[in-house]
Image (cartoon, grey):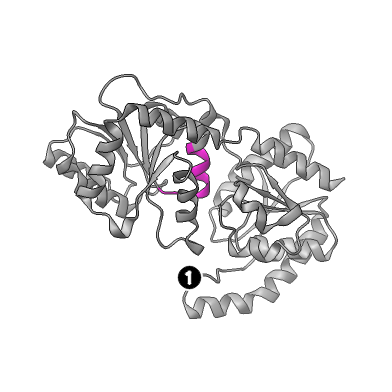
C-alpha cells in the first residue's frame, strides 16, 4: 500500500524525495530498500494482543521512538507525512503534528487500528477504505479505497471457461495452516465434478497438503507459493482466503466472489469486520474458523459451486466495492495538504 503510493507520487513528480520510516523487524526493512526507496528505522512494538513483558517494553520504547521520529523529520524536512496504520506510524505522525507538518493517515480496515484511533485526534486528514469507517474521523475523512496494483482491476470477473467452477485457496504469501487443515478436512466431502481446486499452501505445508490430495485422489493444482496472483485470480470463479485489508481490496478490484475465513486473532478482530462488510453486501460468504469443520466448509463450497447465478451476483456486488482510483485520490490528498 505505502509502496504503491510512493511509486505513484514518483510517477507524477520524478524528482521527488521519499523517505519511509519503519522498524528493523518489519517486512519494510527488506522490501523498501530493494525497490530503491530510503528507509529510516525506529524501535517500537505492539500494545494489543501481546504479552505483558512485550507491552512493558513497548511503553519504555515510546519516548525513544518519539525522539527518534523528531530527529528523522527534522533531518528530512518533509512537506507531508503519511501514516499507514502500523505501530511505527504512531510516533512519526505525532512528531510531524508537533512540528506542524501536514499529516495524512490511511485506514484500510472497516474498524480502525489502535494507532489510527489515537492519531485520529491529531492528524490533518484521513483516507479510509469503507463508508462505515468515515465516522471515526469526522470531517477529516475521505473515502478513497485501498491502493491496489492495476493488474487486479484487469482480471476478468469470470474465471477460465468450463465446468466445474475453479476454487482458488490461499492464505497469504506464507500460507495459512488452519485454512490448509480445513480444506484437507473438506476434501472427502467434495467431488472433482463439483469443483476444481487451485491451492496455494505456503512452503511449510506444501508437502503434507500435496500428499493429502494424492491420497484422497482429488486432482488439484497445489502450489507452495504464487508470485503472480492476478494470473491465478483470472483462472478462479471463487476465492477462499483470509480477510486482511489488502486481500479484501484485491478481491473487490478483481470483482471475485469469495468465502472469507478471517484470522480470529487479528488485532481488534479487524478481519472479521472486513469480512462482514463484504458479506452484508452479498459479495462474500463469511465462515468462522473456530466453529467450522471439514463437512461444513465442503457444504459452503458446494452451495456456491452449484449456483452459477449466485456467483455472478456476488461478483457484481464485489466489483461495486472497488475503488480503482484509490492511489491517485490519496496522492491528490497528499498534494493538496502539502500546499
- Using the rendered view, name the quadrant where residue 304 is placed: top left
Task: Give the position of the N terminus as an image quadrant.
Answer: top right
Crowd rating for badge 1 (residues with CA inside 10 Å; few <14, some 14–19, many 20+): few
Figure quadrant of residue 192: top left
Residue at 79% across, 51% down: 80
Residue at left offset 83%, top offset 55%: 77
In the foreground, 231 or 323: 323
Q: Residue at x 76, y 43 (%)?
A: 333
Residue 250: give x, y in percent of width and height.
50, 38
- Foreground of the two, 291 or 51: 291
Q: In the picture shown, does residue 15 fall above or below 77?
A: above
Above or below, 158 against 211 in this view is above
| Left or right, residue 285 beside residue 31 | left
Q: What residue would you read off at disc 1?
A: 49
Left or right, 125 with reference to 60: right
Q: Main secondary structure of the magenta part?
A: helix
Query: SS of the residue at dot 1?
Result: loop
Query: What segment is highlighted magenta in the picture?
Result: 242-251
Amino acid at each position: 500500500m505505502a509502496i504503491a503510493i510512493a511509486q505513484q507520487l514518483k510517477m507524477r513528480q520524478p524528482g521527488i524525495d521519499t523517505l519511509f520510516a519503519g522498524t528493523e523487524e518489519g517486512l519494510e526493512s527488506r522490501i523498501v530498500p530493494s525497490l530503491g526507496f530510503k528507509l529510516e528505522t525506529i524501535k517500537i512494538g505492539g500494545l494489543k494482543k501481546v504479552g505483558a513483558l512485550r507491552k512493558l517494553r513497548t511503553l519504555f520504547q515510546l519516548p525513544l521512538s518519539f525522539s527518534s521520529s523528531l530527529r528523522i523529520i527534522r533531518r528530512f524536512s518533509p512537506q507531508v507525512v503519511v501514516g499507514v496504520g502500523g505501530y511505527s506510524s504512531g510516533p512519526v505522525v505525532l512528531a510531524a503534528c508537533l512540528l506542524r507538518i501536514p499529516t495524512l493517515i490511511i485506514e484500510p480496515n472497516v474498524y480502525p487500528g489502535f494507532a489510527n484511533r489515537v492519531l485520529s485526534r491529531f492528524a490533518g486528514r484521513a483516507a479510509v477504505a469503507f463508508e462505515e469507517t468515515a465516522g471515526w474521523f469526522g470531517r477529516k475523512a475521505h473515502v478513497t479505497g485501498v491502493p491496489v496494483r492495476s493488474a487486479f482491476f484487469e482480471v476478468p470477473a469470470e474465471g477460465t471457461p468450463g465446468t466445474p467452477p475453479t476454487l482458488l485457496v490461499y492464505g497469504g504469501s506464507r500460507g495459512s495452516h488452519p485454512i490448509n487443515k480445513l480444506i484437507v478436512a473438506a476434501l472427502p466431502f467434495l467431488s472433482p465434478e463439483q469443483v476444481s481446486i487451485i491451492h496455494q499452501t505456503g512452503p511449510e505445508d506444501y508437502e503434507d497438503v500435496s500428499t493429502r490430495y494424492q491420497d484422497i485422489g482429488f486432482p488439484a493444482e497445489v502450489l507452495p507459493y504464487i508470485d503472480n496472483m492476478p494470473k491465478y485470480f483470472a483462472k478462479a470463479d471463487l476465492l477462499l482466503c483470509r480477510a486482511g485489508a489488502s486481500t479484501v481490496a484485491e478481491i473487490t478490484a478483481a470483482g471475485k466472489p469469495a468465502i472469507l475465513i478471517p484470522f480470529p486473532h487479528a488485532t481488534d478482530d479487524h478481519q472479521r469486520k472486513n469480512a462482514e462488510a463484504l458479506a452484508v453486501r452479498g459479495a462474500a460468504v463469511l465462515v468462522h474458523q473456530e466453529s467450522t469443520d471439514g463437512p461444513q466448509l465442503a457444504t459452503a463450497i458446494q452451495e456456491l459451486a452449484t449456483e452459477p447465478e449466485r456467483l455472478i451476483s456476488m461478483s457484481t456486488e464485489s466489483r461495486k466495492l472497488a475503488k480503482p482510483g484509490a492511489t491517485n485520490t490519496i496522492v491528490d490528498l497528499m498534494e493538496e495538504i502539502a500546499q
